[in-house]
Amino acid sequence: MKTTSIQWQAVINGTVREIEIPPSRRLLDILREDLDLTGTKISCEIGRCGACMVLIDGEPMNSCLMMAYQCEGTEITTIEGLHGETEDALHPIQEAFLEEGGFQCGYCTPGMIISTKALLDRLPQPEEQEIKEGLCGNLCRCTGYGGIMRAVESAADKCAQRSSLIPAVDS
Amino acid sequence: MNMYQHNSSLSTPLVPTVWEPSSAEEAVFLKRQYGADAAYIAGSTLLRTQWENGLLSMPEHMIRLDTIPGLRGITEHKQRIQIGALTSLRECGKNQLMRIHGNTCYTACCHIAAPSIRNQGTIGGNISSAVGDMIPALLVHDARLVWLDQANHLAPYEQELIDWLEQVRLGRRSPDAILLGIVLDKGEPDFVSMHHDQEESTFACNSFSESSSWREVSFYRKVGRREAFTPSLVTVAFRALMNREGTLVDVKMAAGGGAGLAMRLSRCEHLLEGQVYDPQQTATLAAQVEEEWASYSDPFASEAYRRQTAGNLLAAGLWEILYQEMERG
């Protein structure tokens, strides 16, 4: 069989999206250019900085490294898919980053928050070393790591206080 | 077999044709058909960095390996375990068979890149790059690679990892061969029986069993350019059997890292083989590693720095094993 493109389908932030694209197109480009989800940031493009981090079936992945065919049929969560109890409310992780000053220029923040979501889903009360490991694929060029560490610790507390993590996306 | 193609034009960048072989034989056929214009694609995490950095051109033909059945997962056999080439690094780093029978490999899988990369990257891709950080760990376990190649009439065959690295070093690597899996021999049951109880660590040390006075000691260490995820500068692995008196036998040491090919350090192994390691020997071992390991310089680190680091990592790691023994009394 020979085609000029694939009919790519995925559930993005709870909504089924279907577009015709080359199978080798990067997920990062699909999100930003085809679907206008520009919260996912473009930076190093080689999987080192984590600015383009998304959740694929709940696991953190670098969208700059992911080709369309590699994530076809999956559930993808971007920063736009995180929210609190209502769609216009902040997610506790986002609240924590704001309150603790877990960002400076803010460019790395979507990726940091997505990685934090993946970490806290797996380890609701992570130790310091576990936070460092969970976020080791995310770089902050402003080197604001102190605030980021505080934000993750605060986010863990906030999530624990609310007894369970708020769903990332509407089902 | 499915094939997807998106035509390129002069005004747009090349968009590769993506092939979906249903068998390894079919993939080899495609690779032979398109030669240097084609590449096997697994997790593609390293390939993507090479494409983006201009070190490699994006191939006109991408041959997917994930459509080939049977290349994922870790299976236990009577005397060995086999790791499918498309098993993710994350899966390897969570697998108890890997932990018991390939402890340094298990540890390496937990320390390669970042969690997001380990979710996508595969052990086969790490090896096929020839410079992956898994390789020193696999070398101290005498890993064998299972290949499929036209040159062997499309019959799977096993090859010692160390022999394949030598082929790479000599530029005689088969460009069409597909890595199907990795084989690790199981150790003696006495050496591994109590491994479940050990804490996860970059340092591993099995307990003595009642029926054996020997146990396996091993460690894996990695140094990069900074503390967070970064390409390695140096990776080392050590594995040996040690008795209650501290005598080391079956010593295996390897070093690699960065863009250099990993190698076993046979002269260093000989230095320790059959010896009761004396902490006074630490400096001697470090110097021997420094002398034996053939590394390279790049803008980030000189060859001298890499050699010295490898020596210090191996000597310090071994010293820690002995220190732990002293602590145990």
Image (cartoon, coloured by chain):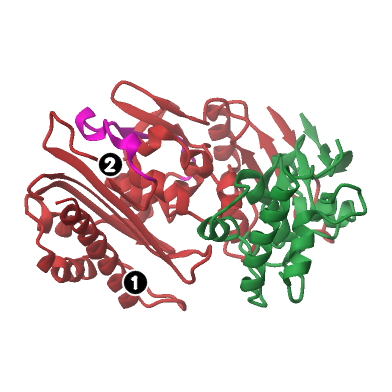
Task: Work out whether residue B263 or residue A143 is closer to the camera in this orientation and state it.
Answer: A143
Q: Quadrant of the N terminus of chain B?
A: top right
Q: Nearer the viewer, residue A122 or B169?
A: A122
Q: CA distance from mark 2 to mark 1?
A: 24 Å
Q: Position of residue B254 (x, y in %)?
A: 28, 55
Is B301 magenta? The answer is no
**Residue that carries the numbered disc 1 in the rendered image:** B306
In which quarter of the view is residue A147 placed? bottom right
Residue B214: x %, y % from top left = 14, 39
Amino acid under disc 2: Asp
**For the residue labelled by badge 2, is the local secondary structure a helix, a strand or a loop?**
loop
Residue B190: say if magenta: yes
Q: Chain of mark 2?
A: B
Name the subunit of mark 1: B
Task: Say which of A162 and B161 sits in front.
Answer: A162
Q: Can you give x and y, in whole percent of width and height, for residue B216 in the image?
A: 22, 42
Secondary element type, mark 1: helix
Q: Which mark is residue B275?
A: none
Read off the magenta span: B175-199
User: What residue is rendered at 51% in x and 44% in y?
Assistant: B89
Chain shaded red: B
Which residue shows up at 42% across the image and 54% down it?
A: B133
Chain A tint in image: green
| Residue identified by numbered label 2 | B142
Residue B246 at x, y = what percent?
A: 10, 50
Task: Please tell me in which quadrant of the rendered image residue B278 appears.
Answer: bottom left
